Image (cartoon, helix red, strand yellow):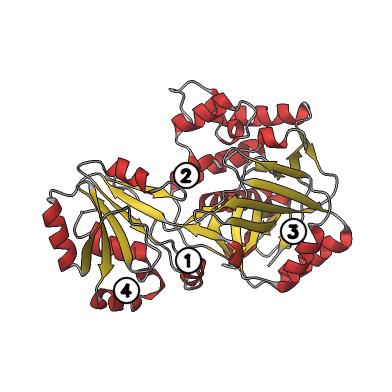
Amino acid sequence: MRVEPFACLRPTPERAAEVAAPPYDVFDREEAAAYVAAHPRSFLAIDRPETLFPADQDMYAPEVYANARKTLDSWVGDGTYLRDPSHSYYLYRLEATSPDGTTHSQMGVVACCSVDDYVDGTIKRHESTRADKEADRIRHIDALDAQTGPIFLAYRDSMALDMIIGAASTGEPLYDMTDEEGVRSTVWRVSRPDAVEAIRGCFEHVPCAYIADGHHRAASAVHESLARREAAGVAEDDPHVAAYDTFLSVLFPASQLMCLPYNRVVSDRNGLTAEGLLSALGAAGLTATPSDHAVEPSEKGTFGMFADGRWWTLSCDDALRSAAAAAGPVGSLDASVLQDHVLGPILDIEDPRTDPRISFVGGIRGTSELERRAGADGVAFSLAATTVDELMAVADAGLLMPPKSTWFEPKLRSGLFIHRI
């Protein structure tokens, strides 16, 4: 893989905690506006520039993106941001308390990955993207002449990289801060030429990487790169390399990642009574057992269901388990089993990407949120977390997962690293 150091635009250490923000896509419009109102120097004001306009403003209008550029330029001008003088890598450690109470830590390399590696499949995908979401980020990159949201990548563990990263993270960090969710972010800069070359050389021996989170950001950065190549008259086989030929990324060893469940709620039972729903589930090969507590599955092939004010454990019978195991890397996913045997045929959710009756609850939000959303008339399903090995198997096969199959925690903070193109 080609994984390059870059001249990062980043906040000064004094401003980093104030600027660093949650990812732009974890908020709806109202939530984003409220967050920026409470944190006016948060990078979310740039990532979601409509937050600085009235609520009825067209959030995709040219003046909205232009204002994002104006805000960034002003923060560079007033010293909030500085640009490092040399091309460097950055080490980014995230530490959080996992749902079982243990401390989780993961250390990634902030760098710029090759657009060509994305195009030829060296950087592998497992989700489809939506054109409207891509268009938003394309306009954002174009207006800022910068990539501001790092793509979250995973690679199969490398002992050589582990050794280099471990040694490079023993010095004084650039940043060391804890956010409002209790996640500690620590960042080191790697600029010494021999260390830079060692990291670059190690990644040359990493055969591929996997997008864990950020499919829309990646697709948008690649689209913008190819458009700029075309505008510059660059031929496909031209060795020309510009800043826009790479995209901002954080690369983590796969073994360090924490993937949490991504649960489903359907707003109604498709006309079924609670008894009718249980009967349909039984016919589909799912045995329902009443539970006196909320069900949070840890075993593949087991689901929790909340309906009519109570919880049930759903277990696949032997025939359904065998059929799922034989269905390949996508068909065997619990999200696929639920969609193919329950959500589609029983609850009439034909396209979970577009059906307004279904919503998704990921990560650390617990079963009480599922109960709240399901209410008296709906039904909620809890799933075991998709594993990183399952993600890689799907991507290696060149296939796509069902929507909302993975939820990685902790989330990368935005605004700490900007790649000017």
> For residue 56, what is the image quadrant?
top left
Q: Earlier in the sequence, mark 4 or mark 1?
A: 4
The answer to which of 254 and 65 lies nearer the viewer is 254
Question: Is there a contact, CB below 8 Å, between mark 4 and mark 3?
Answer: no
- For residue 133, which numbered disc appears in the image? 2
Q: Earlier in the sequence, mark 2 or mark 4?
A: 2
Position of the C terminus by quadrant? top right
Residue with the mark numbered 4: 324
Calculate the distance from the C-alpha at mark 4 to the C-alpha at mark 1: 16 Å
- Density class for disc 4 (Cα within 10 Å; few <14, some 14-19, many ≥20) is many
Calculate the distance from the C-alpha at mark 3 to the C-alpha at mark 2: 27 Å
193 horizontally vs 324: left or right = right
- For residue 387, which numbered disc appears in the image? 1
Q: Amino acid at mark 2?
A: Lys
Residue 45 picture location, percent across and down: 59, 30
Residue 34 picture location, percent across and down: 50, 27
Residue with the mark numbered 3: 4
Q: Earlier in the sequence, mark 3 or mark 1?
A: 3
Tell me the element at label 4: helix
The answer to which of 90 and 233 lies nearer the viewer is 90
- Density class for disc 1 (Cα within 10 Å; few <14, some 14-19, many ≥20) is some
> For residue 301, what is the image quadrant?
bottom left
Q: Amino acid at mark 1?
A: Thr
Residue 174 picture location, percent across and down: 79, 45
The answer to which of 60 and 413 lies nearer the viewer is 413
Disc nearest the viewer among 2 and 4: 4
Q: Earlier in the sequence, mark 3 or mark 2?
A: 3
Tell me the element at label 2: helix
User: Does residue 324 appear in this view?
Assistant: yes
Position of the N terminus by quadrant? bottom right
Calculate the distance from the C-alpha at mark 4 to the C-alpha at mark 3: 41 Å
